[in-house]
């Protein structure tokens, strides 16, 4: 079957809801207006890489807290809605709430008055390819 004529996953489900499914008209009657075409496609990916520098309480394991920070920032970015920019202060706040972290500095992307968010356009979805895209270093 030509892959352009057969959709699976979320896009396939969206097609069934909008256009209907003749094999199951009760569950999928279709909701689009007659004669309209609705273009359904995947979101545009926007890869996020971020570098943080942290200060910790005495006695806190840096390797252990690094994993917590990476997981928390990963979750924040992945749960961000489609097309909604991510304010960098929310990343600082998320990391700051982790027990043992006393301060957080965003090293990159630049964080200043003119650059206070990761800007996403309509249809873009922020994602992190791997946890190493979230770099954490220790402030001395």
Image (cartoon, rainbow, N blue to C red):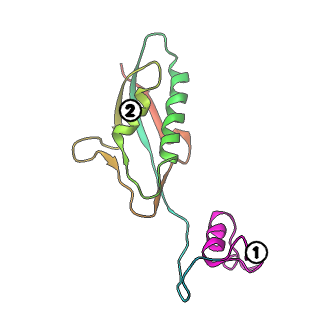
Q: Residues within 10 Å of mark 2 (few under 14, many from 20)?
A: few
Q: Is residue 22 above or below residue 50?
A: below
Residue 39: x and y in percent read: 53, 77
Q: Please report the residue visible at 66 percent of the width from the left and 67 percent of the height from the top.
A: 13
| CA–CA distance in space, label 1 to label 2 | 47 Å
Question: How many numbered markers are drawn?
Answer: 2
Residue 91: x and y in percent read: 40, 37
- Give the magenta range: 1-29
Residue 40: x and y in percent read: 55, 73
Find disc 1 in the rendering and name its residue: 24
Which residue in the rendered view is the most extreme toward the left?
113
Which residue in the rendered view is the most extreme toward the front?
26
Q: Please report the residue visible at 53 percent of the width from the left and 39 percent of the height from the top.
A: 132
Q: Is residue 10 left or right of residue 102?
A: right
Find disc 2 in the rendering and name its residue: 93
Of circles 1 and 2, the one toward us is 1
* Quadrant, the N terminus: bottom right
Which residue in the rendered view is the most extreme toward the bottom?
35
Q: Secondary structure at mark 2?
A: helix
Q: Is residue 87 left or right of residue 136?
A: left
Q: Is residue 104 above or below residue 140?
A: below
Query: Can residue 108 be seen here?
Result: no
Q: Please report the residue visible at 38 percent of the width from the left and 29 percent of the height from the top.
A: 53
Q: Is residue 7 magenta?
A: yes
Q: Please report the residue visible at 35 percent of the width from the left and 54 percent of the height from the top.
A: 119
Q: Is residue 61 magenta?
A: no
């Amino acid at each position: 079957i030509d892959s352009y004529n057969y959709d699976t996953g979320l896009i396939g489900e969206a097609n069934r809801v909008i256009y209907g499914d003749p094999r199951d008209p009760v569950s999928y009657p279709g909701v689009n207006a007659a004669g309209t075409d609705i273009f359904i496609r995947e979101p545009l990916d926007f890869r996020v890489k971020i570098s943080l520098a942290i200060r910790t309480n005495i006695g806190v394991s840096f390797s252990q807290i690094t994993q917590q920070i990476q997981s928390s920032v990963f979750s924040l970015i992945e749960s961000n809605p489609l097309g909604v920019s991510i304010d960098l202060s929310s990343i600082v706040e998320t990391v700051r709430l982790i027990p043992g972290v006393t301060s957080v500095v965003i090293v990159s992307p630049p964080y200043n008055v003119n650059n206070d968010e990761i800007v996403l356009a309509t249809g873009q979805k922020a994602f992190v390819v791997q946890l190493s895209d979230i770099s954490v270093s220790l402030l001395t």
